[in-house]
Amino acid sequence: MQFRGPAIVCANHAHGENAVIARLLTPDAGMVGAYVAGGRGRHLRPVLLPGNLVEAEVRSRVESQLPFARIELRESRGPWLSEPLPAAAIAWTTALTTSALPERQPFPRLFDALSALLTALCVAPSASGWAVPLLSYEVLLLRELGYGVSVKRPEEGDWPAFFDAFDRIGRELARYPLADLRADVMAARALLRERLARIREA
């Protein structure tokens, strides 16, 4: 494996004293786990935040070997991780993506959709601007993995219809791609729902 190109950081896990194993969603190689030397250091730690868009150079000598990656920041989501709603949405969508997608299987439509969703999360003036696109991303992920789901797309700002669709899609996610992991991963979605519900109550 050898490539250089854009990637979305979806997760990272400490490895040894100062390195991390990063999970990167790429347009052509799909989800790739890679060793990043110094990933826990002062320079790279803010680069490897989930949701960040990076330029990744990934190399491995043999297919079965964990590849090494060099990472450069292209677009940071860090400023929005201190905002409760965007932070919860970023945490959920990246956790969903890294947990549901198989390794090294390309999903270019999901890469484009997640990139657009993360941008919307950071530029929309309120959750109304990204709540429905978030549902669309979840539905697309289910369909790309072969699970059909029939949910009517709610109108922007129609919170009762949104939460009805949100809950229906959640049941499908817990039943299919996250069936073995829902206790951990679905907790991030439950937190997002709780924070979104406060908008309706306000």
Image (cartoon, helix red, strand yellow):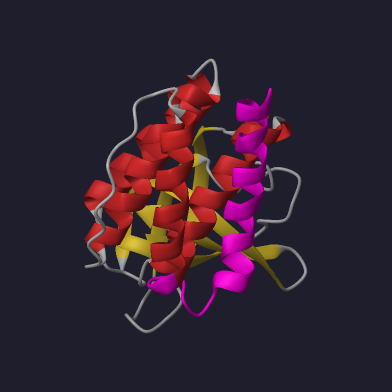
The percent position of residue 29, horizontal first and vertical second, equals 28, 61
Relative to 69, say whether 146 is above or below: below
Is 10 positioned to the left or the right of 149 in the image? right
Is 119 positioned to the left or the right of 137 in the image? right
Q: Main secondary structure of the magenta part?
A: helix
Is 80 positioned to the left or the right of 42 in the image? left
**In front of the other: 156 or 110:** 156
Residue 160 in sight: yes
Give residue 12's quadrant in the image.
bottom right
Residue 36 in sight: no
Residue at image point 67% right, 28% down? 201
Image quadrant for the N terminus? bottom left
Magenta residue span: 175-202
The percent position of residue 132, horizontal first and vertical second, equals 39, 34
**In front of the other: 174 or 101:** 174
Spot the residue most to the bottom: 64
Residue at image point 36% right, 33% down? 116
The percent position of residue 23, horizontal first and vertical second, equals 50, 61
Is 201 positioned to the left or the right of 62 in the image? right
Image quadrant for the C terminus? top right
Residue at image point 38% right, 64% down? 172
Relative to 177, say whether 129 is above or below: above
Give residue 22's quadrant in the image.
bottom right
How many marks are shown on the rendered structure? Answer: 0
> Is residue 184 part of the magenta span, yes or no?
yes
Relative to 172, say whether 199 is above or below: above
> Is residue 49 part of the magenta span, yes or no?
no
The percent position of residue 99, horizontal first and vertical second, equals 48, 67
